[in-house]
Amino acid sequence: MITVVTKGIKVSVETKYQHEYSQPVNEHFVFTYRITIENNANNTVQLRARHWDIYDITHPKHEVDGEGVVGKQPILEPGEVHQYVSGCNLKSGVGKMSGYYSMERTSDGKTFNVEIPEFILMVPFKLN
């Protein structure tokens, strides 16, 4: 698990290669990632948006921006945790992702970015 803390918001990532949904002969490699967001700050926050930088080793960087995560804009009170699972397809079987969440402090509307730690996506058989 990879973890980073920004302004009291802890973001952890776990990844998994999904061989049953992948088709290596067609350059289609499927990965899932589980994100855990913990509010260790003293303020209630709401996740408003996300930004991803997706790198596939043999292809140009791809950027993805959108509202919330998997259709939600969760509100996290101090001490609360939000977890979700999403996925990414690569053509090479080797890549990485990183990015940030745009959060809003509910008490005053102030927005700030929370880092999503960089994580590697690699097909297990590429390690040999």
Image: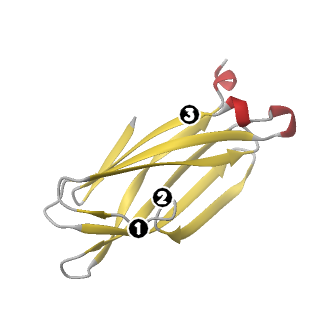
Please, is residue 58 above or below residue 6 in the view? above
Can you name the residue that lies furthest to the bottom here? 108
Image quadrant assignment for residue 112: bottom left
- Give the residue at mark 3: 16
Residue ID at (26%, 68%): 45
Residue 38 in view: no
Please, is residue 60 above or below residue 107 in the view? above
Residue 93 in view: yes
Q: Are marks 1 and 3 in contact (CB under 8 Å)?
A: no
Residue ID at (63%, 48%): 88
The disc labelled 3 sits on which kind of residue? Lys
Which element is circle 3 on?
strand
- Give the residue at mark 2: 99
Please, is residue 40 above or below residue 119 in the view? below
Q: Nearer the viewer, mark 2 or mark 3?
A: 3
* Neighbours of disc 1 within 10 Å: few (<14), some (14-19), many (20+): some
Which element is circle 1 on?
loop
